[in-house]
Image (cartoon, rainbow, N blue to C red):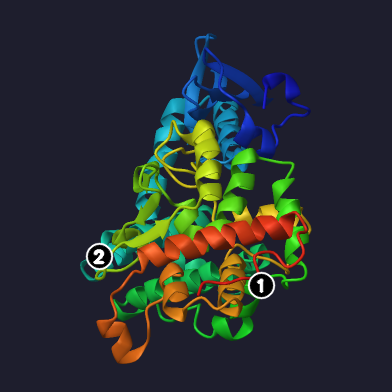
Amino acid sequence: MKRSDIKRRPLSDTALVNLAPEAGAYRELDSSGLYFRVKPNGQKSWELRYKKPDGKWSWLGLGGYPEVSGALARQKAAELRSDAAEGKNPIASKKARKAAEIAATNETFEVLAREWHTSRLAGWDVGTAKRVLGALERHVFPLVGKRPYVSIMSMEWMELLRGLERQGILEQMSRVRAYCKDIYDLARVTGRAMNNPLEGVHKFLSSGKAENYAHVSLEELPALLRAIRSYPHARDIQLGLQLLTLMAVRPSELREAYWAEFDFDKRLWTIPVERKGRKKGREHLVPLCKQALSALTELRKITGAYPLLFPGRSDRTKPRSDTVFLMALRRLGYEGRQTGHGFRHIASTVLNEHGFPADHIEAQLSHKPSGVRGIYNKAQYLEQRTTMMQWYADYLDGLEQEISEPYKTTAS
């Protein structure tokens, strides 16, 4: 978003997120002497212009964005302007308030959560530890992280979790609820809380795996494939939806993927075991069909300068939001009818109906066989899956082009 596109002040949240950097640092007025500063490297922060006792104008930093939101920056600015009007030194006032904030942080939910996270590290692999903290940083800390944990009521936790429910990320919602409940258990057993406000909350939330894995019928699939092909918004997300249809991987596996995991010459994607949330086992090998290679080659032209296939907008070192594919499907009119995870169900249905061996399908889906068979069957069937997934990609092409009974002959 360019500065010339700003429509109103104070600056909207949309403007704050999307204001683009320029060759030189610049400031944009928000309100009453409060300015939003954007550096060439994309770093954003708040500054207050104020008059010193000697009558000269000066600048006072109020913190970086998005850590300091627009609402918080305006509150801080109002407090400092009030101090200045009373003859107080705004710098001294800022330091005094900062000291009070630091004293209070030892009782905030974020501090308690990070203590809990540290206490659990010995039992987690690196990938799990990173995912758990990432979920808290994305979904919880921005809303209640700075609050004293004893002041957050059950109804507030209910509303936070229902917000995730409304986004359609039901599995993530369930995990976040479990993490936060465990965090409060730490406070309770160490004598810092009398009760756990998340106790019983799960009874009034959706468990919703069926909705989370929603997928269209095979009759509706051609129209969905054509809708994805004509997705009118971000090209990288459109390519991501195509890749989900072609490879039957979990949306999180694709969203968090690194370019270094792909071998274009061998036509192979290797998902490290650490990224799969496991301590044991081995990496998951995903063969790349011709259509997937084509989509990846185009995607690399868009995001190849970054380590991640789908780098975040504000922080390129982190992947895009876990709702990015779900929201894209909603924009296409498939809310409640198709999810990113649902493409795995479609692939499983089609491949089973066309006679491919169950072992090959389950290996492609990275499912571990149950019981004794799961202990001894370590085969990945890479050669067979390469042939199977190329057949599947061609089959989808046929559906998209409305070819009657596409590729009806199955593997023998």
Expressed as whole percent of the image width and height from the top left, the position of residue 315 reads: 47, 39
The amino acid type, in three-letter code, at marker 2 is Leu
Mark 1 element type: loop
| Label at residue 293 | none
Task: Report the residue marked by disc 2.
Answer: 121
Q: Residues within 10 Å of mark 2 (few under 14, many from 20)?
A: few
Earlier-in-chain disc, 1 versus 2: 2
Left or right for 134, reference 212: left
Q: Relative to residue 57, is residue 137 depicted above or below?
A: below
Please name whichever residue, 308 or 410, is drawn nearer the observer in this view of the structure. Answer: 410
| Label at residue 214 | 1
Q: Relative to residue 74, is residue 39 depicted above or below?
A: above
What residue lies at 72% left-to-right and 60% top-to-bottom? 399
Q: Quadrant of residue 403?
A: bottom right
The amino acid type, in three-letter code, at marker 1 is Ala
User: How far apart are labels 1 and 2 at the CA level?
Assistant: 34 Å
Mark 2 element type: helix
